[in-house]
Image (cartoon, helix red, strand yellow):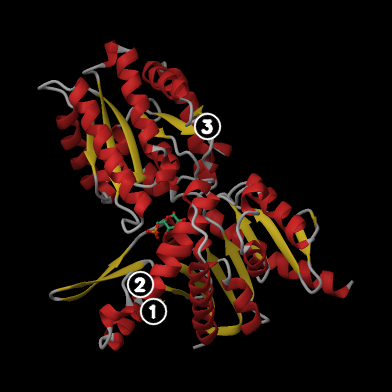
Amino acid sequence: MGAKFVLVANRLPVSVTRTEEGFLFKPSVGGLATALSSISTEKILWVGWPGLPAEDFAGHEKKVFSELESLGCYPVCLSREEIEVFYHGFANRTLWPLCHYFLQYTIFEAAYWEGYREVNRKYAETVAELADEEATVWVHDYQLFLVPGFLRRLLPRARIGFFLHIPFPSYEVFRVLPWRREILEGLLGADLVGFHTYEYTRHFLSSLRRLLGYEHQLGLVTTETRAVKVEVFPISIDYQKFARAAEDSEVQARIEALRREVGERRLILSVDRLDYTKGIPQRLWAYEAFLERYPEWREQVVLVLVGVPSRTEVEHYQELKSEVDELIGRINGRFGTLGWTPVHYLYRSLDFPELAALYWLAEVALVTPLRDGMNLIAKEYVATVPEDRGVLILSEMAGAAAELSEAMLVNPFSQEDLVRALHEALSLPRDEKIERNRRMKERLRRYDVHRWAREFLSALEETRKLQESFVSH
Ligand code: G6P
């Protein structure tokens, strides 16, 4: 096919489900899809998993493939067994907890590793069949650490970029992984490796030096054969989409409905995928302690907690779901009255108007992950909320804290910090809110997701020039 620009991610930006009437194709309008649609380079081909096992569309491949093709996507077909070892296994039972410092949840299982390697090889082979020899290939996230290495062997002249969307952990944590060297070598197949923060870059460079003996100069790593650039690109959001959300009539209707439901009460918002890295139980314990310590806020506030179902086949996610259900029941049972429910819980994903209405009305957003690569909820909230209304309480452990320094920064492990921040946020003077929000909004406006994608891709071009000068010396 000779595609000039290929984007590879574990999931396609379209998910396919099988219903009784046939197949359903649901495009997801994630930040990445928006960012890339604004870059007027070549037509982009997406390669990734369509979200259901190959067995579920056996016999219908032609239809599924051609429908996806019309959406600019090419599927990597994974069997149930491959999904189990690669996705539920190595990606989500090994790498995800390890990179988020949950060593106690990390499973080291040779069969998972082998499945991960084979599926990564499959992704690389699929790309190599579709791409031009000199194509630009942008590989995303921890599910595909080995793709750059495999791809480099198949397409030696391609421009390969890799971006990690989660934290790269400290060397002391990364070193426990039995396959640590293979992962690093896989990444070095790329020309450019990008991270959200300077810290993640530092951790990666220190792992390269200690495990493989490669030094770097200003982020340029030199191996025996190649030079690889390592750089920081904090991902962002489609700022205008959120900043202008309240101009949309559907969003306005949701805001009105929500206003009627909440009444005069002050809205505290919490939105996450239901993931143990997000610190949801800690947030609920803190809310309980806050109601205990400051009885004057009872009946005056309401916490809307949105938990988007995620990775429900992995045990720790199931346990978290029960824990959150129980905690909410306990808080509502303890403090609730006939006219007041302290926590409103939504266990589902929200569409854009529902989400934007919540962002717009919430006086406080509690974004307190125990560890998070970036956290775009924090950015979306700041972009949407009117400048004289909202206060963002943000975890120091989220990558976003490096940019949103005017938020109320908290240590999510400190209940004292969270309780105090809740009280202060609800009491913050209007002028101070405006001052903090203006600065953060301005920063997000300037460095949005379009700029993020442009900067990554132009750095990939620059790296090529650097490599040429490296080879000629
Ligand atoms: C994180 C990861 C993404 C992933 C998303 C949803 O943001 O960095 O790569 O797609 O979670 O998780 P899921 O396992 O459903 O793809």
Residue depicted at x 24% and y 16% = 298
Q: Can you tell me which quadrant of the image ligand 1 is in?
A: bottom left
Label whose residue precedes the other's in the sequence (1 or 3): 1
Residue depicted at x 50% and y 53% = 106
Quadrant placement of the C terminus: bottom right
Q: How far across and how far down the image is residue 226, in percent?
A: 77, 71
- Is there any visible trace of residue 342 in the rendered image? no
**Quick one: SS at disc 3?**
helix
Q: Is residue 340 above or below residue 181?
A: above
Question: What residue is disc 2 on?
Answer: 50
**Quick one: SS at disc 2?**
loop
Please identify the quarter of the rendering in which residue 329 is found.
Answer: top left
Q: Is residue 96 above or below residue 341?
A: below
Is disc 1 in contact with disc 2, using a CB cutoff of under 8 Å?
yes
Question: What residue is disc 3 on?
Answer: 439
Looking at the image, is mark 2 or mark 3 nearer the viewer?
2
Question: What residue is disc 1 on?
Answer: 77
Q: Which mark is residue 239?
A: none
Q: CA distance from mark 1 to mark 3?
A: 45 Å
